[in-house]
Image (spheres, rainbow, N blue to C red):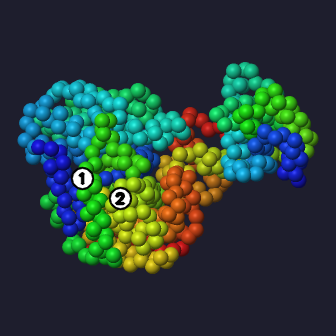
């Protein structure tokens, strides 16, 4: 069975699945910023532990489902298939050499380490490894290949491209076993959405997002196991990873460093901004987009509709434009997001709105629609990002409703300051 | 006043692209001139040049071979950069076209530095608060400058409100701020 045949789509809610486990697409700018924020909050050692654990859990869910659906039963079959899935996702090409007693893994091209070196390598000297996601994947793949219980394997990345080593290398050793939490699969996701409603420009958004979903069906890792598209490295990724790391870090800060809550929430929002600027922006400027929709018009209402369609096309959920007054106010609503099922299943009802990613994304959509001269095809550089978000007009975002809190839907209001 | 002095001094040097006078120890732009049509941020260039000379000075001192006559020459693909300490308070950075012969550059430079040096004022450098200097350093070198205040706030456990006045931070907060800045920049110590 081909990996692409394992894909599923909850079309009404723009949610995507692989072997019934949710997945989304994010670019390396977002992924690196996300991981950096976790380490800023928890410190390098604890950040690495939390990120590796989250990846381990998320890939156990995915690979367990993939092996079952594809009928992979032997260790060799499972190890091969796991590596293929990882490369197909754009996470990199990882060679596993493992047994029930542990072993090793290596790679010259992993999404995180490779992209970190490309983006920051000439400016920052890094000593800590960057590939918690690959580490967690390697541990999960080894356990499942040999039918070992959850968390039977512990993993350490001892060489990393980001730390200027020639390759990334991992050592796997037996560990203390802990019980696994139940998987967040499609059935659970379906329990945490509300019926989709139509927003402004709905017909056009549906048409474009369907086109983008179809385009993304053809996206897979190259010979390095990486996806270089839209001027960025894109990776199919597991919401379980993002959600566990974000909410574990935020909850920890809330418990132990209450004064720092505004900073971590702002950084999580900033990650959403980074995503929209880098991924959505580069999609809008890409030849692929031009083939799908046409050349950029620079009309703010077009940009807003396009961004909403991109969010749906990447599997972020059913986002809709409830209200848009150029230069003044934007109201984005969501009947589903990839954050809600995880939060509600793991933590119950939230006491306050917690869709940090969508908060930052909504604000960035306003800025992209209002302040970027799309017809001039600007280079979306780091300097331009800084200039754009520091310049006038400036906006603020407030989440007024949140599915995680038990509201009827999620709602983000962006207003000019 | 100083800008006019530099303008007169560079008038006869056709291969010169820019001159930057940096006030030390804070690496702040004091004065500059750039050829018409050049779009450089004089503040940024002056700050980087100042930091470069400081790092060079420390490196040479570590080797036991520092002298006040020290000069840094950088030959890049498109330009020839010469940095010189005029006094303990000022650094002058000159950017020439790459094709300029080194002998001519030295000759022009000697005359130029003499004229500029004569016009420099006597200064009493203030010892600016370390917290302010750390935040300025981060703003110049952090990989994500848009997020750096949030990042150090979270890492150092210093509230965003307190970071608005870095000069007012306590010694313990300064220690944590500096430690966080080193982590963010991937260095063992800050060259301030």
The residue pinned by badge 1 equals A217
Q: Is residue A235 left or right of residue A390?
A: left
The residue pinned by badge 2 equals A291
Q: Classify mark 2: helix, strand or loop.
A: helix
Chain identity of mark 1: A
Q: Position of residue A182 (x, y in %)?
A: 16, 51
Camera-side residue of B124 and A208: A208
Compared to residue A307, the image places residue A329 above or below, namely below
| Mark 2 or mark 1, whichever is nearer to me | 2
Q: Is residue A49 left or right of residue B56?
A: left
Tell which circle, 2 or 1, labels the residue nearer the N-terminal end. 1
- Give the CA separation, mark 2 to mark 1: 16 Å
Question: In which image quadrant can residue A391 be found?
Answer: bottom right
Q: Is residue A372 left or right of residue B46?
A: left
Residue placed at 17% from the left, 26% from the top?
A99
In the rendered image, the residue lying farthest to the top is B64
Mark 1 crowdedness (10 Å alpha carbons): few <14, some 14-19, many ≥20: few
Q: Position of residue B106 (x, y in %)?
A: 82, 30
Camera-side residue of B55 and A233: A233
Report if residue A218 is visible in the image: yes
Q: Quadrant of the C terminus of chain A?
A: bottom right
Q: Classify mark 1: helix, strand or loop.
A: helix
Residue placed at 68% from the left, 49% from the top?
B40
Q: Position of residue B16 (x, y in %)?
A: 78, 40
Residue placed at 16% from the left, 54% from the top?
A20
Chain identity of mark 2: A
Compared to residue A162, the image places residue A232 above or below, namely below
């Amino acid at each position: 069975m081909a990996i692409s045949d394992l894909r599923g789509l909850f079309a009404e809610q723009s949610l995507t699945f692989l072997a019934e486990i949710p997945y989304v697409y994010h670019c390396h700018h977002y992924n690196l910023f996300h991981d950096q924020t976790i380490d800023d909050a928890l410190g390098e050692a604890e950040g690495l532990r939390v990120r590796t654990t989250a990846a381990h859990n998320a890939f156990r869910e995915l690979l367990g489902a993939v092996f079952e659906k594809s009928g992979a039963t032997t260790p060799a079959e499972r190890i091969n298939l796991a590596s293929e899935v990882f490369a197909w996702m754009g996470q990199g090409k990882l060679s596993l050499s493992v047994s029930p007693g542990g072993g090793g893994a290596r790679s010259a091209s992993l999404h995180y380490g490779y992209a970190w070196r490309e983006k920051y390598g000439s400016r920052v000297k890094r000593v800590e490894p960057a590939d918690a996601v690959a580490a967690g994947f390697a541990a999960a793949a080894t356990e499942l290949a040999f039918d070992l219980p959850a968390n039977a394997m512990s993993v350490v990345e001892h060489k990393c491209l980001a730390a200027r080593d020639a390759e990334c290398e991992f050592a796997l050793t037996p560990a203390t076993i802990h019980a696994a939490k139940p998987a967040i699969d499609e059935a659970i996701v379906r329990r945490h959405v509300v019926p989709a409603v139509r927003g402004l420009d709905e017909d056009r958004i549906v048409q474009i997002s369907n086109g983008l979903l179809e385009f993304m069906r053809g996206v897979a890792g190259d010979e390095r196991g990486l996806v270089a598209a839209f001027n960025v490295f894109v990776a199919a990724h597991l919401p379980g990873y993002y959600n566990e790391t974000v909410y574990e870090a935020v909850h920890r800060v809330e418990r132990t460093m209450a004064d720092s809550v505004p900073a971590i929430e702002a950084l999580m929002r900033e990650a959403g901004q980074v995503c929209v600027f880098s991924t959505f922006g580069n999609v809008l400027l890409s030849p692929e987009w031009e083939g799908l929709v046409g050349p950029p018009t620079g009309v703010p209402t077009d940009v807003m509709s396009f961004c909403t369609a991109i969010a749906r096309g990447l599997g972020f959920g059913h986002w809709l434009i409830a209200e848009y007054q150029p230069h003044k106010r934007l109201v984005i609503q969501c009947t589903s997001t990839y954050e809600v099922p995880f939060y509600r299943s793991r933590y119950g009802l939230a006491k306050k709105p917690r869709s940090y990613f969508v908060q930052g994304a909504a604000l960035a959509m306003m800025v992209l629609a209002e302040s970027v001269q799309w017809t001039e095809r600007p280079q979306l550089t780091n300097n331009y990002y800084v200039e754009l978000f520091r310049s006038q007009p400036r906006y603020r975002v407030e989440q007024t409703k949140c599915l995680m809190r038990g509201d009827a839907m999620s709602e983000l209001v962006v207003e000019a300051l | 006043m100083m800008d006019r002095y530099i303008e007169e001094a560079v008038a006869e040097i056709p291969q010169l692209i820019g001159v930057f006078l940096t006030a030390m120890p804070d690496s702040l732009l004091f004065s500059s001139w750039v050829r018409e049509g050049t779009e450089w941020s004089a503040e940024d260039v002056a700050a980087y040049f100042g930091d470069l000379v400081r790092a060079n000075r420390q490196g040479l001192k570590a080797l036991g071979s520092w002298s006040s006559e020290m000069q840094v020459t950088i030959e890049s693909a498109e330009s020839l950069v010469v940095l010189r300490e005029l006094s303990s308070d000022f650094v002058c950075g000159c950017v020439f076209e790459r094709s300029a012969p080194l002998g001519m550059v030295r000759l022009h430079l000697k005359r130029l530095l003499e004229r500029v040096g004569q016009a420099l004022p006597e200064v009493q450098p203030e010892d600016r608060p370390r917290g302010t200097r750390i935040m300025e350093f981060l703003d110049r070198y952090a990989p994500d400058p848009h997020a750096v205040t949030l990042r150090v706030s979270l890492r150092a456990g210093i509230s965003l409100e307190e970071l608005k006045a870095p000069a007012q931070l306590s010694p313990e907060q300064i220690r944590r701020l500096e430690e966080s800045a080193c982590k963010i920049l991937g260095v063992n110590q800050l060259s301030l």
